[in-house]
Every structure is written in C-alpha cells, then in structure tokens.
C-alpha cells in the first residue's frame, strides 16, 4: 500500500545535529543515513537506532514519519532505508526566506508508507564511445537510476570498453579500461543497483548503430570479417572461431561485473545467416546451439540470460500486428527448446495509434511469453503513454517487471520520471 499524509503544517529542519531514528534489522542502517545526509544536504545528522517496529511487508518498502523534532525511518532492508532517503531528498527544500543557505533544508511533516509495485525495475544504459557519452555522463545516469528507485542497471559498452581478451573490439582512443569500467560497476552497487552487463551475441554485432554505418571491429580490423555475416550485422554462427571470440567478451564482462546475477545477450533485429556456409545450414539449429552454449556458460557463473523478444515472434504474425516481430519460422521454432530461466525482454518503443486511443493495448506478445512460462519484462522507450500503459499491462498479466530503454541520451532525462511512475506506483 502507498499512502502519504500531511501530519501538520510544520517543518522539520535538516541541519547539523537534527534527529533521525532508524529502525532496520540489517546492520549499517544508521551509517547509511549518516552518509546519505552528508551527500544530499551536507549536514551531520544525529542518528539513533530505534527498536523493532512494524516495517512494510516488502524488501524495498519503507515508512517515513516526519515531525517537527524528529524523522523516523522504518524498513526491513537497507534498500528500503535508501529509498526512504531518496524520497526525503525529493521532498526537501532549501531554507526559505534567506538570501543564501548552505546545509540547511526543510522537510514537510508527513507520514509515508511506500513500496514498489514491481519487483524488477531495470534500465538499459548505452555507453557510446566518448565524447558521445562521457564517463561523467554514464555515471550521472547510474546515479539518476538509483535516485528514481530502479534496482537493476544494464550497461552496454558499444565499443567504449577495451576488453582484456579482445582490446581490438573497441574504438581506438575512444574507449576506457576494464578498471575504469569496474568503477562504474562498484558505483552502481554502492547505490543499491544490481549491475548487468550486455553484449550482443547475434545481431547488432557491429556494436555501432545501424544508421551511422560504423563497425567497431571491422573498420580497423577487416581481417576479422569471417566472424560476421557478409554485411557485418550478425555474427556468423557456423564459424567456431565466432564462439571462441564471443566467449572471451562474455567472460571479460562476467569478471568486470563481478559475476552478475543477470547477463543481457541482446539478440534483437537479427536475421537468418547469409554467408556461404550459414545459408546452406540448418540455421535454426545453429542458433539454438549458440543460445544453449551461451546459456551453459552463464549458468556456470551464476547468471541468468536476458534476450530481446523479437526473433521469437514471426514477422507478419496476424496476432501480433501492433508489436515488434522480426522472427522467421525457424527462429520462432526454437523458443520451446530454450530453458525457462531465459528472461524475455519484450520491447516496444511506441503505442500503435489504435492503442493510443484506448490506452489499454492487448499486450499480445507479453502474454505470449508469459503463457510459454518465461519471466518477461516490459521494455518501453520515451513514449510516455506507452510507458505508463506498459506498467499497467505488466501488473495486469503478472510479468516479472519492467526494463526501460534509453538509446539516445538526449531523450533520456525524462524517461526516469515516467518509468518511476509506471514501475513504482500501484
Ligand atoms: Zn555465416
């Protein structure tokens, strides 16, 4: 349940020595409040540990009680306490009626019970090679994700990472080391986010957007052409050297991300193989073997694979005309042979016109994958109506959660706010 009540017309002053009481069975809650108060308001608060109190029945839920003399925070976990502090940061105003103010803020006296509607709230961040995405910008996006109470952050390097196994799979002079990348992973964890790596193991093999015609590997190393289909868009699945190369990338990311619980394998907007070998092969069998091999590698390291959904819906499927479908009869046929711990990411950037009129799409693809037994995530982009409708659809059909996409940084600022409403509000 989510409630917010104004308790009085008074304010609590957030200044040095102001009183906070924290009630949380996990150790470190008082230290967390102390640290975040310094970060947010540059004040040294006085934190006392309260006794056991009834906390919201949700790991990420929290209760806030602000009076004129004390602020009390209650949660079952440190994640709940952190969310409570982010809410207070959103509510706080600088001291009023003065010319300047430092380390002095006010909070309204409120009583808040809050918890997320969806358990999985992810965001996909694109780290395009600098200067398109500067290091500070990706760090800012990670901090914003935490501030808006996401709990998973997928980071896709797009050639910005010098892989230890294959440094050539990055842009010369426009990439960062694995050590610098590891710092982003640590930052995400410190902010309460679960970091998730992503590398495309099927289509989007160029690690560059299609409209700019670049190819992260082949532009500087054309000798690697045998690893790709002739147009460079998909990896060549009939070449054993492709698997060896990709294993290197995957293992690097598993190490940099400190054995993550999820690993995004991409797989969107891909097509059948076209090279001299693949076009004669049983391509669905090649693809299935490729996915199962990646699955086994990830399972060995404790990670669940995530994949975009569109190759599993046949292009032209009359039941899914308003949804993204890039599959062939062959790629669609392998879905039933995949282990059910694959997480299917059902993406749709915009509402179709018919759905915009009603605001309640049928979510044919979402329901399809749920009915097949897969944990499924609803993945919107910047269309506000689509994002909010996705949130309702995910809750209505019992999907695993939501996974926001960003793609173009310039449009990404407001997706945080809309997604937070769609994924957190009940
Ligand atoms: Zn091929």
Image (cartoon, rainbow, N blue to C red):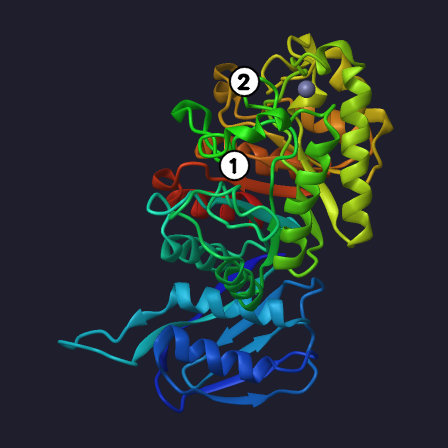
| Residue 357, x across and y down, in percent | 48, 19
Looking at the rendered structure, the secondary structure element under dot 2 is loop
Is residue 10 in sight in this rendering? no
From the image, tell me which residue sits under label 1: 388
- Please name whichever residue, 343 or 112, is drawn nearer the observer in this view of the structure: 343
Q: Which residue does the image show at 61% across and 58% down from the upper left?
A: 256
Q: CA distance from mark 1 to mark 2?
A: 37 Å
| Residue 398, x across and y down, in percent | 73, 39
Ligand number 1: quarter of image: top right
| Residue 107, x across and y down, in percent | 38, 73
Q: Determine the image quadrant of residue 98.
A: bottom left
Query: Relative to 75, is 119 above or below?
Result: above
Query: Relative to 340, is 146 above or below?
Result: below
Q: Is residue 399 left or right of residue 172?
A: right
Going from N to C along the chain, the mark reached first, 1 or 2, is 2
Query: Relative to 321, is 159 above or below?
Result: below
Determine whether the beta carbon of the residue marked 1 sits less than 8 angstroms from the nearest atom of ligand 1: no
């Amino acid at each position: 349940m989510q409630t917010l009540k104004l308790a009085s017309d008074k304010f609590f002053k957030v200044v040095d020595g102001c009183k906070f009481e924290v009630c949380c069975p996990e150790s470190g809650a008082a230290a967390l409040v102390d640290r975040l108060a310094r970060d947010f308001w540059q004040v040294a608060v006085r934190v006392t540990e309260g006794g056991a109190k009834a906390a919201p029945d949700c790991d990420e839920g929290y209760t806030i009680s602000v009076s004129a003399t004390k602020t009390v925070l209650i949660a079952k976990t440190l994640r709940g306490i952190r969310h409570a502090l982010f809410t207070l940061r959103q509510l706080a105003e600088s001291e009023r009626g003065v010319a300047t103010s430092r380390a002095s803020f006010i909070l309204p006296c409120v009583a808040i019970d809050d918890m997320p509607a969806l358990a999985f709230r992810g965001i996909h961040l694109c780290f395009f090679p600098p200067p398109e995405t500067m290091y500070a910008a990706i760090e800012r996006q990670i901090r914003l994700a935490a501030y808006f109470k996401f709990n998973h952050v997928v980071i896709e390097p797009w050639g910005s990472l010098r892989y230890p196994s294959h440094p050539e799979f990055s842009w010369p002079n426009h990439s960062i080391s694995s050590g610098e990348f590891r710092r982003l992973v640590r930052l995400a964890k410190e902010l309460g986010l679960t970091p998730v790596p992503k590398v495309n193991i099927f289509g989007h093999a160029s690690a560059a957007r299609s409209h700019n015609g670049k190819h992260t590997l082949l532009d500087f190393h054309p000798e690697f052409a045998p690893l790709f289909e002739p147009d460079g868009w998909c990896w060549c699945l009939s070449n054993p050297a492709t698997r060896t190369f990709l294993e290197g990338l995957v293992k690097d990311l598993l190490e940099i991300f400190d054995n993550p619980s999820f690993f995004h394998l991409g797989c969107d907007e891909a097509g059948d193989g076209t090279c001299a070998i693949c076009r004669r092969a049983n391509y669905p069998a090649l693809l299935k073997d490729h996915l199962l091999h990646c699955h086994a590698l990830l399972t060995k390291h404790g990670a669940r694979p995530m994949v975009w959904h569109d190759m599993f819906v046949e292009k032209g499927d009359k039941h899914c005309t308003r949804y993204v479908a890039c599959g062939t009869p062959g790629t669609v046929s392998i879905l039933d042979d995949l282990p059910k711990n694959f997480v299917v990411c059902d993406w749709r950037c915009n509402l179709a016109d018919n759905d915009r009129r009603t605001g309640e799409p049928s979510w044919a693809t979402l329901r399809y994958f749920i009915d097949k037994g897969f944990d499924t995530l609803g993945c919107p982009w910047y269309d506000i109506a689509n994002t909010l409708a996705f949130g309702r659809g995910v809750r209505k059909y019992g999907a695993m959660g939501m996974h926001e996409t960003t793609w173009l940084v310039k449009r990404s600022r407001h997706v945080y706010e809309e997604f937070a409403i769609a994924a957190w509000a009940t």
